[in-house]
Image (spheres, rainbow, N blue to C red):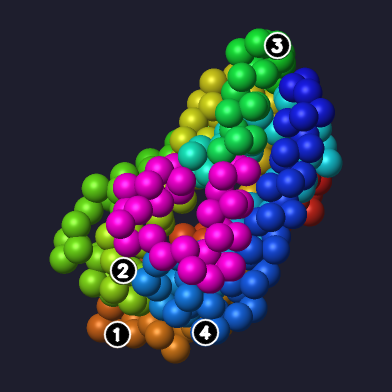
Amino acid sequence: MISNTSRFLTYACAVLYGLTGLLLFMFPETLAPVFAWKVTSFMVMTIGAWSLGNAWLAFINARRWDWSLNRTSLLYLWLFGVGELLVLFAFRAKLVLQHPIAWLYLLTLVVNVLTAVVGTTEIIRLHPKSTPNGEILNPAQKIPAVLFVIFVGFLGVYGIVAQIGDVGTNGGIFPEIMSLFTLRSFGVFYFSLALAVIPFFWQIGYKTVLHHAFASYGLIIFITVAAFINISLFDFSQHPGGLLYFGAYLIVGIPLAFLFRKYGTR
């Protein structure tokens, strides 16, 4: 397993994401006007939901410090931090760092990237074994992972390359019009989720898959709750694509709940 330095940094990510997420999720209307860039209160609450989900994921991984279990979910965390910090750099001209919440968000991403750099360096140096944990998935059991990567990966790539005015960017799926800054942030989030599941295509034990799903479950819960709290913003008759926003999380989240009940969380 990689060292306790990485473990400590992963715990630090959990604390910082937890604090950032709690503030953004609980006080979106107050913090939206002073966030790091121009966003609505629903967008702020959604970013808070990501952060709370990342806090849960980081905590579970640091608690279960076993490379054979957490290698794929740590990959998501590292990719997310690096990707989101690159988005901030790309849009640095529009970055507003005047309020403590903006600095807290930036600090959280910086610590996340530091965690990724240290972890990647240790993997190269130590070569931890990626022995399958539990019975290896058969090809049929990998089909959901393939579908997940195709669908979520498409959303991620589209969010990274689409321009304002393209299909789905004018309230067609997310009920509010996003700036390119926000659209790229959403795109990186989905793209990171998809890339982290690609290792499922090869030899991987079912316990690693269960752990990955359980560690990621906070993302599903908090983002779905944020969407239901703001359901009045959705106009499903005019923009039926909004159903896709809800459905994507429910279609994944509900079956996973039954899976955890039957097989446990690792």
Q: Estimate the spatial distance between the alpha carbons at disc 4 and disc 3, rounded to whole Å.
A: 46 Å
Provide residue 96's location: percent of width, then percent of height. Answer: 41, 65
Secondary structure, mark 3, is: helix
Q: Residues within 10 Å of mark 4 (few under 14, many from 20)?
A: some
Residue found 54% across the figure and 27% down from its top = 199
Crowd class of label 3 (few under 14; some 14 to 19; many from 20; radius 10 Å): few
Which of discs 4 and 2 lies nearer the camera? The answer is: 4
Which mark is in front, 3 or 1?
Answer: 3
Of callouts 4 and 3, the N-terminal one: 4
Amino acid beneath label 3: Leu
171 relative to 18, above or below: below
Q: Which residue is mark 4?
A: 29
Q: 123 or 170: which is nearer to us?
A: 123
190 and 243: which one is in front? 190
Find the magenta span and give its range: 83-112
Q: Does 63 sit above or below residue 134?
A: below
Q: Which residue is mark 1?
A: 237
Closer to us: mark 1 or mark 4?
A: 4
Q: Residue furthest left?
A: 165
